[in-house]
Image: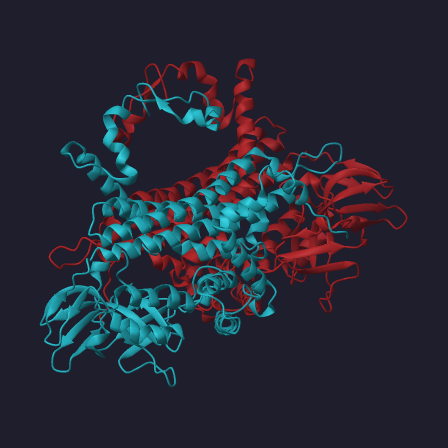
Chain colours: A cyan, B red
Amino acid sequence: MEEVDHLAPERNKAQFDVEAMKIVWAGSKHALEVSDRMARLVASDPAFGKDDRTRLSRKELFKNTLRKAAYAWKRIIELRLTEEEASRLRYYIDETAYTDLHWGMFIPAIKGQGTEEQQKKWLPLAYKMQIIGCYAQTELGHGSNVQGLETTATFDRKTDEFILHSPTLTSSKWWPGGLGKVSTHAVIYSRLIIDGQDYGVNGFIVQLRSLDDHSPLPGITIGDIGTKFGNGGYNSMDNGVLQLDHVRIPRDQMLMRVSQVTREGKFLKSDVPRQLAYGTMVYVRQVIVSDASSALSRAVCIATRYSAVRRQFGSQDGGPETQVIDYKTQQNRLFPLLASAYAFRFVGEWLKWLYTDVTQRLQANDFSTLPEAHACTAGLKSLTTTATADGIEECRKLCGGHGYLCSSGLPELVAVYAPACTYEGDNIVLLLQVARFLMKTVSQLGSGKKPVGTTAYMGQVEHLMHCQCAVRRGDCHLESSGLRVSGPQVI
Amino acid sequence: MEEVDHLAPERNKAQFDVEAMKIVWAGSKHALEVSDRMARLVASDPAFGKDDRTRLSRKELFKNTLRKAAYAWKRIIELRLTEEEASRLRYYIDETAYTDLHWGMFIPAIKGQGTEEQQKKWLPLAYKMQIIGCYAQTELGHGSNVQGLETTATFDRKTDEFILHSPTLTSSKWWPGGLGKVSTHAVIYSRLIIDGQDYGVNGFIVQLRSLDDHSPLPGITIGDIGTKFGNGGYNSMDNGVLQLDHVRIPRDQMLMRVSQVTREGKFLKSDVPRQLAYGTMVYVRQVIVSDASSALSRAVCIATRYSAVRRQFGSQDGGPETQVIDYKTQQNRLFPLLASAYAFRFVGEWLKWLYTDVTQRLQANDFSTLPEAHACTAGLKSLTTTATADGIEECRKLCGGHGYLCSSGLPELVAVYAPACTYEGDNIVLLLQVARFLMKTVSQLGSGKKPVGTTAYMGQVEHLMHCQCAVRRGDCHLESSGLRVSGPQVI
């Protein structure tokens, strides 16, 4: 049968400069070039193929991922890729792997919370992948409530060591990616105990497995927590469980940028403000918002193309049926998701600015905008990941029965994105934090404390209560002048 | 560690008779007894185990399902189970399989659309599983629009045969469960063509594979359409693709209860009213609504137990944290789903009554309630399956990170239920049908045509417009008297 390009007529209808939009979407001409080049590199190399991903057993899938990650590392070195290029390469390989945590959490934790000396010791090993690290915070019984973590790191003055211990079943580390099979090291979050006193949760670098034969070190019980939602998805990741039975590490493996324990067992706070940690959180959430846009855009792209090709009902005189993209019920579900993918892309850029702004203020010891910045990132993380998870599933449904087949690509997108609503702050818990911030801001309006950033408009509440939106009909929203506010009441 | 029953205290708080509720839920004491006995039979037999289901490759999973289905058939015969018992046994085996279509679609199609003679010939073979059948309606390019099916069955007067043919790629049969690997026969829906004239879509019994060596018969191209959403789920089903290249079948393999083609090639309508088909649709949708309740109740059960066991935040003086079931945010999401599972159970019972009522009326040539019954079943199918699919996913999220693990059971429930929103009438298309019926009913109010059944209240529109709901505060809804309607305006 002759192949017909069913999409060309739709593409020809574009009323904007597609090439210019590509650059806006990528962020810059340079970013587009890098992205494009890495995409081609991955697509043209059969070693990165993923056609069989949904058919493999868990074991075969995981082996494949190990092969791919090792091969990617080899190519990165052979081609002398920059960190930007390597990161895009990993993005297009499109398979969750222990390397995500090694590069995305283990290294940043040491960079952010380690002293200069610690960074000098550990980062070169990590950069060369002579050690592989993961990030062990969540426990079987403790997720959102980080202050409830049970794992202890008790200082032993005699030997100048910390003793890491899991006192209960619920204190088992649970979920860390890379932990189950691959990692040789972990940053483990534990309650710091000195002389029976609890100094709260701190990070410790702990070796898990032998660098000779990869076997777990004494006192360490470790394993994979089993299959996760979906075909492929996070099943290529070795999310793990870890129990520590009085595991000893040298004192200098506590990450000591913010707090220190001296040889004498004295607990010290450094002059680095503890709020610096918020800077990292703003950064991580900015990445999550950008990822939401990217994930949603992939699903929307599939659903939009399908809607242009698929025809159903409405045949006139035996002619072709109507393209489903021309049905209002399809448009009403699909187009807002397309718009959201763009909106999340641009609000992600704004969060990058917010990160720079917060970082500069923190360095100048200005903490005044932190609560508002925290509420913004919490709210946007929750909003964009919920909308994206629901949106991808909606795109799957918009492809009818065909969206249920793995060959549509959508089931994998649904399953691999789902945990974004839970990790880095459960979305419901985050919204409660935003609500608390907003209530507090409103209650302080009379006190002379000026609301800042995105809430600054609340300072004008008296004036705003007397304004009125000029929009009278729906299509006024399409005129920029319709958005001006004037008159006696805003709704 | 000592095992603690964390659920016992919650269970002890029940303020209703749990044993009595079990009977209400099952439908009768007898149904509860059968259900319970079959559940134990499955649970106690390792051959029905499903622990490894999410770890297997597609091929191994499918082989396992074949083994289980054959073993179940052996046990059904050995234990001389009744059809009711066998059906509950298959329910508890809890694995989609070709047998679902054989018993649930192939046999009912022959029963409903076959003549007595056809039933006598084919049903005994099917009951003994000497032939295995599937139901081939949907095509690659044609789902909701059944009238758009392209497969043709052309009558050849010379040989007294029909020639079945797939003229295009889009006319390939696509999706039928049991087709890909197992079925020997299918009921295939095709356009009936006699002397170049198109008599619309009819069902034909077609043999697909040899009963000797299971190879596809001449002219038949057949295969499995690949992996589907989720771990396990429908991957134990061999949904298939079928192309027919001028396949000949004897004339008496057209299902002829409603329409016939004579030896001379004359097309006849029997005196069996065509509307009888609606009776079957009401029946199928009643089953879907009952299934929705059953699927949702499984997810709600897991999420409720988890919520009682899981604790997070709110520790007082180092005591245990708060059970998440005691948080309003958890209750507001979980309890309406629990209530919905019960509501769908009872509306399913009402649909059983509606089916009986419609059937009796059809037999008396009373078609007056058909449009309303059709709207009810379409609306309830759409409402309950959408709410259930979304509700199961919400239950998954209510279990936090743990709901993402297959060991929670929830990912499989999500994936196996998802297609219910698409099959047997796409939910959006069905809602449009309901909307059309409602608009028509309203527009006919003045014409003297009385609205019937669930829309009968519209006949009192004049009166109702002057009524007012007595509820003034939220808690009035808890008093049955609050639901009375009186006074001048209802909202």
Q: Nearer the viewer, residue B418 or B450?
A: B418
| Point 88% across, 46% down: residue | B157
Residue B339 visible within the image: yes
Residue A334, percent across and down?
52, 40
Farthest residue, direction bottom = A212
Q: Height in image: B422 above or below A482?
A: below
Residue B328, percent across and down?
25, 44
Residue A473, percent across and down?
46, 21
Q: Nearer the viewer, residue A321 or A433?
A: A433
| Point 58% across, 58% down: residue | B99
Residue B450 visible within the image: no
Q: Height in image: A185 above or below B380?
A: below
Examine the image and state in which quarter residue A420 appears.
bottom left
Examine the image and state in which quarter residue B374 appears.
top right
Quadrant occupied by the C terminus of chain B = top left
Examine the image and state in which quarter residue A465 appears.
top left
Residue B203, percent across and down?
71, 46
Q: Height in image: B428 above or below A171?
A: above
| Point 52% across, 17% down: residue | B445
Quadrant occupied by the N terminus of chain B = bottom left
Please indicate whether residue B480 sits to the left or right of residue B53 in the image: left
